[in-house]
Image: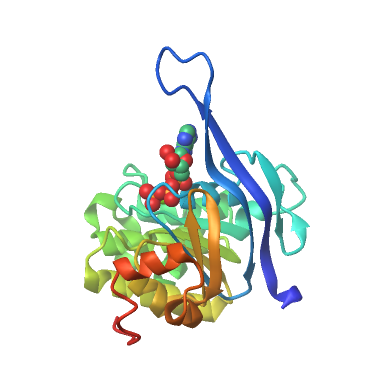
Amino acid sequence: MENNVILSVSDVSKHYKYYKTLFDIKKNVIKAVDGVSFEVYKNEVFAVVGETGCGKSTLSKLILGLTEKTSGEIYFKGELLDYKNKKKDFRKKIQILFQDPYSSLNPKKKIYKIISYPAVRNGIIKNKKKDRMEFALEQLKIVGLPETTALNYPHMLSGGQRQRVGIARCLSVRPELLILDEPVSALDVSVSAQILNLLMDLKNETGMSYIFITHDLKLVRHIADRVCVMYGGKIMEIAETDDFFKNPSHPYSRSLLESMSFLTSTRRNL
Ligand SMILES: Nc1ncnc2c1ncn2[C@@H]1O[C@H](COP(=O)(O)OP(=O)(O)OP(=O)(O)O)[C@@H](O)[C@H]1O
Ligand SMILES: [Mg+2]
């Protein structure tokens, strides 16, 4: 399994300091992520679950370099993940698909510009209208949107269509790891099923890995290879999905499953 590791998170913490009240002299510390270690393998779906505030989004920010670690190291394909290292294209290799397709696209830009922007920024294509349009049309095809979408603005699209644009934008730089932070929670059931099918097809075609952050255990059971349970910034358990649902080893995992009435049924019912 060693060579199959795409991401290795080693004893990583993020402690935020803040004043609780205006009169505080000393800052309080919140351990948003507290000494977590795990590996993500190539082409797997690694689900991260846990109650609100347990540190899931902070973890993704740490992996994306959007916030400084308090301690610990992260390795991408065996190399220290350091976004300041200009010789490496880590920023291209690790992308995030945001939760809310309504606010994650620039409302003032046409879709072809939104989709082609990361490719321009990363020098994959030239910043010429013709090149950007050609590139965007290819990407639109991959995510199943008609060519006419290219000239639309985000407000002209449905939530599902916007999320497809978001996926096209992520894929435009050929990432190897995609972080999906509640990618379908803002969509209705049938549209979210289509988006999930698209994501799973793309994963299988490209060999990408997903870190899939969600509250939806039904979804986890359906799509994840492994499950990581977080609580209070720490990892409680990491298990193969089937093992997790059959025999959760940590009491918190059991209570999570009980709250979803999963222990009474082992049927895959998505
Ligand atoms: N910039 C910040 N400053 C101070 N505290 C923060 C900051 N960002 C997050 N936190 C705190 O860190 C903890 C973890 O937050 P985080 O957003 O990672 O949770 P989450 O698991 O993603 O929750 P949710 O499921 O609601 O999205 C929370 O208690 C949050 O209030
Ligand atoms: Mg979050």
Q: Quadrant of residue 258?
A: bottom left
26 versus 113 height, above or below: above
Instruction: Quarter of the image for the N terminus: give it.
Output: bottom right
Q: Quadrant of the C terminus?
A: bottom left
Which of 120 and 270 lies nearest the eye of the viewer? Answer: 270
Q: How is the image coloured?
A: rainbow
* Residue that appears at 43% across and 72% down: 199
Residue under the image location 62 percent in, 38 percent down: 68
- Residue at screen point 59% across, 41% down: 14
- Above-or-below relation of 50 to 240: above
Q: Residue 235's x, y, as percent? A: 55, 58
The image position of residue 58, as x and y in percent, is: 51, 46
Mark yes or no: residue 237 visible: yes
Q: Position of residue 264 (x, y in %)?
A: 30, 81
- In the rendered structure, the answer to whether residue 226 lies left or right of residue 216 reads right
In this picture, residue 192 sits left or right of residue 171: left
Q: Nearer the viewer, residue 183 or 130?
A: 183
Q: Is any atom of residue 145 visible in this view? A: no
Q: Going by the picture, which residue comes out furthest to the bottom?
A: 267
